[in-house]
Amino acid sequence: MGFCADSDHPMFIYEYLQIESLYGWLHTGKKELLDWRTRLHILQQIAQGMEYLHSCSPSIIHGQLTSTSVYLGDGDAYVVKVADFGIHELSQNADRSPGYLDPEYAVTRRLTEKSDVYSFGVLILEIVSGRIPLGSSTEKDSFNIVEWVRGLHDEGNDEHIPDTCLHGVCNVTMVSRIINLALQATEEDANERPTMSKILNELREVNKTETGHHVVFAEPDNPYNSTDSDAPSSSSAMLSEWCEKDLCINT
């Protein structure tokens, strides 16, 4: 929401969130509350936020999209908030997001829109499967969610991918459609990955099929000007906070 540079310890000022991260919902015993339709809704809202960032001029790269940078409010109508975007520009170490990081970064040392697409693809797999993207670092017990899903998918075993609490309550055809989308997003070659716009359109179609109608979310009006020092300096200053009916993006 702002920053302070008046002392030897500059700081960012954020909205105080009394809600839990998506990671907390998925991995600390509350995932049973997230049914299939709710997870699709969450994916669409995250994609809508990311597509908005990428459509800005100049575009904003999140750089560290993980389940810990997405916050999910409690209640009948879940409120999805995407936070921490742009923080990577303040750090020399983007490797702090293991499992979500674009493999091309190891060569280019540069994050792009397609890097966010890769991270979102991993996030899709995490939300669908309920599994943490990376397991033990030991060779015997190592687990990589992209490799695991790709192996099952190639064998035609998509039904084994969803979270155990979703078994029998989600459409296998729709699961395969979502898995296909995630695997496209996590292609090693960034040029083979879809844009966030294409991903959002696909998720809207899946949600439309699952719910029987298309949920329309309001488009942003006039975003607030950002005072964050890491925001791009241009005539179209970036937003400090953007809220829709069910989506908020916070710096």
Image (spheres, grey):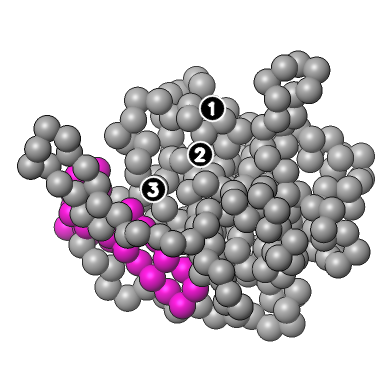
**In front: 8, or 132?**
8
Q: Quadrant of the N terminus?
A: bottom left
Measured as percent of width and height from the top left, residue 243 is found at 38, 71
Measured as percent of width and height from the top left, residue 26 is found at 66, 52
Return the residue at label 1.
Answer: 104
Q: Quadrant of residue 173?
A: bottom right
Residue placed farthest to the bottom in the image?
213
**In front: 173, or 6?**
6
Amino acid type shown at disc 3: Phe
**Residue occupying the point 67% across, 48% down:** 27
Disc 2 + disc 3, Cβ < 8 Å: no
Q: Quadrant of residue 108?
A: top left
The magenta span reads 226-251
Measured as percent of width and height from the top left, residue 157 is found at 91, 46
Of the residues under marks 2 and 1, which one precedes in the sequence?
1
Q: Is residue 85 left or right of residue 47?
A: left
Return the residue at label 3.
Answer: 85
Measured as percent of width and height from the top left, residue 214 is found at 64, 80
Return the residue at label 2.
Answer: 115
